[in-house]
Structure formats: C-alpha cells, structure tokens
Image (cartoon, helix red, strand yellow):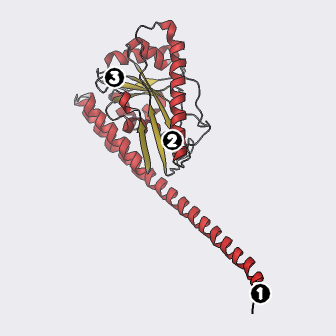
C-alpha cells in the first residue's frame, strides 16, 4: 500500500503545474487578442479616417452647420472606441449647460484622448487646437482645417495666440474648443504643467473653462506604440470655471486654478479605475 505522505508532494506539484499552465494559457490568449485587435485597428482606422474625413470635408464645402459636421467627428470617435474595445465611463456631465460653449481643458496621455472627449461629451460641438504636423495627413488634415480647428506651430507663441484669436472670432456660437493644455502627450503618463494658450483664449473670448480629467487611456494606447490593449477610460467633468471679470494679468492664476481642477479630476478618475480592478496606467 503506497505511503500517503509520499503522494502529497506529487499532488502539490501537479496542482502548481496546472496553475502555471493556466496562467501561461491565459497570457497567450491575452497577447493573441491584443495582437488581433491591433492588426484590425491598423487596417480599419485609416479606412474610417478616409470615410468620416471625406464626409466632414464635403459637409464643410457645402456650408453645412457646425452641428452636422460634429456628427461626423462623433461617429468616428465612437467607431474608434469600439475597435479598441474601450469601455468609456463618464462622470460629472450634469455640470454641462448644453446650450452654451466652452474652452475645454483636459490632460493628455494618449492618441485615444480626443476620441474619448468627443464620445464622452456628445452634446458639445467640439473643435480642436492641433499641431501643424497633423494638417499634412491626407484627408484627416484637410478635414481638420476646413471644419474649424485651429492650427498652431507651438514654437511661435505670439503667432499662435493671434491665430487662435482670429479663429475664435470666426467660430459658430455653439462651437467649443478643446485644448490639451500640456501642449503634447505625456510620454510618462503623468500630469505636466499647462501652457498658456487655453487661458488666453478664454480671457479673449469670455468663454468659461471646462476642466476634464482622463484616466486609463495611457494603459489602452501608450504613446510610442500602436498596441491596443483592452481596458476602460474614465472621464471626469468638473464644474465650469468662469473667465468673466478677469483681466489679462489674471491668466497665470487662472491657469493654476484649472490645473488644480484637472489634477483633482484625474486623481478621481484613476481611483475609479482602481476600484474596478483596472490599471489606469502611468504614475499618479
């Protein structure tokens, strides 16, 4: 009769081996899913840019309303999030007055952020402040230029401020303008200091600032890689901050106030993801 004491180590080893096999299998399955999602996105996203971009250009040339063009942006954004298998969660939308426009200020950690803001705030007719390099992308750049986005050079601050001021004077009253106020994507996922453009724009136009905090997009689509991971993005909308009754000399204090608001919203969004067992990506 076999000794039970000799069998227990073998049973323990067998159990451990099965657990290791299960984890390896799950990891391989995750990698396969991520690779498939990324490959599909690399094919269908350019096609979607061509489709929605051509539609936006046609509407702009035909003199369609800003709201009609916005539907093309919104359709593209929702399509991208579906392809990426990204679950978008929005909190604080009750702070919005959908009958007015804003200077929207958000943190920026991923190329997925513009689509998240558009899809998360569908009642706002949003246009962008974009760097000059994007205008040279076929169809996409033409659509941005013809539909009211503001092109900036970033190295010519004075000219950029003047360009933004001119474009704001030409915009339809229902159009809000989105600034990623850090100036570019955060390469490490952290929140960085804000540049002055959004706050100069708010003071010049009299529009209120709408702070928005994003979390999760750095994990889903990390800068420098095309890999699309399954994940969630949380968008936290804060209370609007008025720029009325402020002078040009107040722009630094206004920038600091909005930065604090975005930082708090981002922290709240990151905690929501952690509470769900999701990785928000990047440092706090």
Residue depicted at 42% across the width and 36% down the height: 91
Which mark lies nearer to you, 1 or 2? 1
Is residue 246 found left or right of 29 in the rendered image?
A: left
Q: Closer to the camera, 221 or 274?
A: 274
Q: Position of residue 216 (x, y in %)?
A: 52, 42
Secondary structure beneath dot 1 equals: loop
Residue depicted at 61% across the width and 65% down the height: 24
> Could you tell me if residue 137 is visible in this image?
no
Q: Tell which circle, 1 or 2, labels the residue nearer the N-terminal end.
A: 1
Q: Which mark is residue 122?
A: none
Is residue 107 found left or right of 61 in the rendered image?
A: right
Which residue is identified by label 1?
3
Residue 179 sits above or below residue 118 on the image? above
Place residue 239 in its image quadrant: top left
Q: Quadrant of the N terminus?
A: bottom right
Q: Position of residue 203 (x, y in %)?
A: 43, 12
Which mark lies nearer to you, 3 or 2? 2
Which residue is identified by label 3?
101
Q: Position of residue 15 (x, y in %)?
A: 66, 73
Is residue 113 found left or right of 143 in the rendered image?
A: right
Secondary structure beneath dot 2 equals: helix
**For mark 2, does the 10 Å Cα neighbourhood hold few (<14), some (14 to 19), or many (20 or more) residues?**
some
Q: Position of residue 43 (x, y in %)?
A: 42, 52
Distance Cα–Cα, label 3 vs label 1 = 79 Å
**For mark 1, does the 10 Å Cα neighbourhood hold few (<14), some (14 to 19), or many (20 or more) residues?**
few
Q: Quadrant of the C terminus?
A: top right
Q: Which mark is residue 272?
A: 2
Residue 205 sits above or below residue 35 on the image? above
Q: Tell which circle, 3 or 1, labels the residue nearer the N-terminal end.
A: 1
Residue depicted at 48% across the width and 53% down the height: 38
Distance Cα–Cα, label 1 vs label 2 = 53 Å
């Amino acid at each position: 009769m076999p000794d039970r004491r000799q069998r227990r180590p073998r049973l323990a080893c067998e159990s451990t081996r099965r657990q290791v096999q299960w984890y390896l299998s799950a990891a391989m399955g995750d990698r396969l899913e991520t690779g498939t999602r990324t490959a599909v996105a690399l094919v269908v996203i350019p096609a979607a840019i061509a489709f929605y971009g051509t539609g936006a250009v046609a509407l702009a040339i035909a003199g369609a309303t800003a709201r009609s063009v916005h539907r093309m942006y919104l359709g593209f954004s929702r399509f991208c999030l579906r392809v990426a298998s990204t679950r978008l969660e929005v909190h604080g939308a009750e702070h919005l007055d959908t009958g007015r426009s804003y200077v929207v200020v958000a943190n920026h950690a991923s190329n997925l952020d513009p689509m998240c803001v558009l899809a998360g705030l569908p009642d706002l007719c949003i246009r962008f402040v974009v760097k000059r390099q994007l205008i040279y992308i076929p169809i996409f750049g033409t659509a941005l230029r013809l539909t009211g986005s503001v092109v900036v050079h970033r190295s010519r601050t004075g000219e950029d401020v003047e360009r933004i001021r001119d474009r704001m004077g030409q915009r339809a009253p229902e159009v809000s303008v989105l600034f990623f106020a850090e100036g570019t994507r955060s390469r490490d996922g952290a929140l960085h200091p804000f540049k002055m453009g959004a706050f100069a724009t708010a003071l010049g136009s009299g529009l209120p600032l709408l702070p928005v905090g994003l979390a999760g997009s750095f994990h889903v689509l990390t800068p420098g890689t095309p890999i699309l991971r399954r994940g969630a993005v949380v968008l936290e909308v804060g209370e609007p901050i008025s720029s009325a009754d402020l002078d040009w000399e107040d722009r630094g204090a206004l920038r600091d106030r909005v930065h604090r608001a975005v930082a708090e919203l981002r922290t709240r969004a990151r905690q929501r993801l952690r509470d769900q067992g999701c990785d928000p990506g990047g440092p706090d």
